[in-house]
Image (spheres, helix red, strand yellow):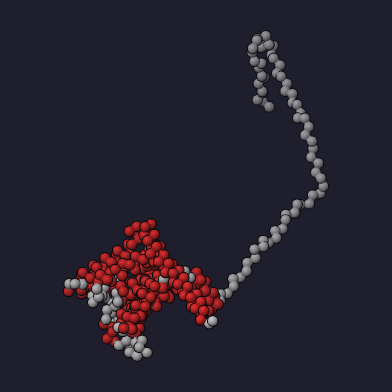
Amino acid sequence: MTTEPRAGRYRSRLVRLARFTGRTLRGEWRAIVVDPVRRFARRGLSGLLLAFVAAFGVVFFHDIAQHPTGAVWVRRLGGVQADLPLWLSLLRTPVSLYVPALDLPVWAGITQLFLAFAWAELTLGRARTLAIAYATTLAGTLTARLMIALGPGWWGFGLPPEAGHILDTGPSAAVVGLFTYLAVIRRAPVVFTMTGGSMVWESVAVPNLAGREHLVAVAGAIVLGLLHGRGARLRAAARSWLSARWPTRPAPRISTVPAAVPRPTAPPTAGPVAHPRPGPAPTRTVPSPTPSPATADRPGSRPRVPARSLDR
């Protein structure tokens, strides 16, 4: 009697687990493969510019490092160590993204690097891809300096001073950071397990400086992925916290009601003024000159005007 309900519950749980696994894998396949392929078909090879540049940079610096003089210049340009001054480490960090570790197979690293930058560029864009890659690499580099500064001890967190002579991880921290960030924002648990889980296993199996820097890169990428798309909320929270911490004085209120303007008053008058009506203009008669008897008989002659006497 009791075995049948238990078998039904187990069967329903297995069905729900299978459905959940199927939905998760289908969504991850769409986020990892389908969407990037569609964007690649829409943008073409220009959407993989960073991936080609990163792969070419790794091959270029790897070939140069095969010669003694080239190895010296590669170390000077992109070799980051914890015992270097901070300003020099920050100056070499962008170039260190293209300097591979010489003790690892370069072609396997190039494949991972190309896939990470291609997926990130098609999903995030060039600017954010470079920002995430640089931020995760820089986080690992600065944390390594902190571990060496603390010294051995500190529950296994500190490192001896000899670790300051070891070269930085190079592009591997950027690759791990990009894969982890994309797995978080795309909700891809399989990719997250393959990247973050492998780094955890590496740091446990081979405890070295590179493994610790990879763990720091994974942690930084997780934090950045959780903060993805929440910039407006964070800015609003920061403004409210700053306004509560340092309240500003309210500005004086300025009245917007216009002042009353007195109306002009007309001057007092004694009474109505009577204006005379205009009458007809007076006519003026001009006397016509009388013709003299000498010129009266001539037709068309002008009459003579008598000259005025000057002796008055």
Foreground: 261 or 29? Answer: 29
Residue at 23 percent across and 67 percent down: it is: 60
Examine the rendered structure and indicate whether residue 306 appears above or below residue 16.
above
> Above or below — where is 83 with respect to 274?
below
Residue 12: x and y in percent read 50, 75
**Residue 271: percent from the left, percent from the top?**
82, 47
For the question of whether residue 140 can be seen, the reply is no
Image quadrant for the N terminus? Answer: bottom right
Q: Residue furthest right?
A: 271
**Residue appearing at x 32%, y 86% in the figure:** 159
Count of residue discs: 0
State the image coordinates of residue 282 (x, y, percent, origin top left): 76, 28
Residue 287 seen in the current view: yes
Q: Determine the residue positioned at 23% across, 72% down.
A: 74
Judged left or right of residue 72, residue 87 is right
User: Image quadrant of residue 55?
Assistant: bottom left
Residue drawn at x 37%, y 89% is 155
Q: Is residue 113 left or right of residue 11?
A: left
Decide which of 189, 222 is in the foreground and name it.
189
Going by the image, does 77 lie left or right of 127? left
**Front one among 233 and 24:** 24
Outermost residue on the top side: it is 297
Viewer-proximal residue, 294 or 66? 66
The quarter of the image holding the C terminus is top right
Instruction: Say which quarter of the image contains residue 250.
Output: bottom right
Residue at far left of view: 68
